[in-house]
Image (cartoon, rainbow, N blue to C red):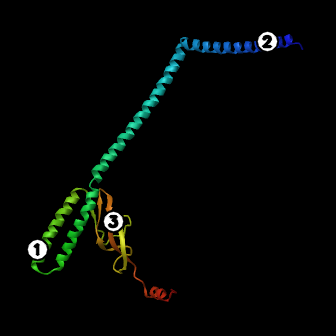
Amino acid sequence: MSLPEEEAKENDTTSGDESHEVTDVQEETSAEEAEEKASTEPLTPEAALEKAQEEVLKFKDLALRAEAELQNMQRRTTRDVENAHKFGLERFLQNLLPVVDSLEKAIEASEQASDEASGAIAEGVSLCHKLLIDVLGKESVEVIDPVGEPFDPNEHQAMSIVENPEMEPNSVFAVVQKGYKLNGRLVRAAMVMVTKAPQTAENARKTDNSPP
């Protein structure tokens, strides 16, 4: 093939590619113009109504979500404020309980003394203790003193287990240290001694004869 023929063939190929590109651009332009025209054309009453209803449903859903979130926030805030009022004294109560324990120990020690002066001191300390317990009661503080009651692991801490045939097994035989609750919430568990059923002679022999 001669050089002029090759150049002519190349020119035909180039012109064909360019014509395809022009056609594609024209088609894209026509599509864009059609979309713009469709968007600018006035909607029919039915289409406008349908579109308006869709918008109403959309904004109604957004409003319901916002209202639900606001209600949840109000409930959380109310609960936090109530807890702050109910349990704001918890740390103060924890620091005050050793004082109550000391007063009770002083009362017990004074009651064991027989002289008149110790009796007067015990009476004064008892009065102070009663006034303090009354004040705590006004602040929704409840004393846990479960002597004779069934052992409750949620409120009691067992310090030892003793045999006592006169009481039901798993009952509180004695309170080593009283417990306290603030508005129903446990602040300190009561330290107690718990009873168990006494061993029979047969069980005792089995225990003694059992291998180490």
Residue 11 - label: 2
Tell me: residue 56, above or below residue 66. above
Give the class, few, some or many, for how many residues have Cα within 10 Å of label 2's Cα (few <14, many ≥20). few
Give the class, few, some or many, for how many residues have Cα within 10 Å of label 3's Cα (few <14, many ≥20). some
Label whose residue precedes the other's in the sequence (1 or 2): 2
Q: Amino acid at mark 3?
A: Ala
Residue at left offset 34%, top offset 46%: 79
Where is residue 69? Give x, y as percent: 41, 37
Q: Are marks 1 and 2 in contact (CB under 8 Å)?
A: no
- Quadrant containing the N terminus is top right
Q: CA distance from mark 1 to mark 3?
A: 32 Å
Q: Amino acid at mark 2?
A: Asn
Residue 120 - label: 1
- Report the side of 102 relative to 44 (left or right): left
Residue, disc 3: 189
Quarter-wise, where is residue 166 in the image?
bottom left
Where is residue 169? Give x, y as percent: 38, 75
Where is residue 195? Give x, y as percent: 36, 76
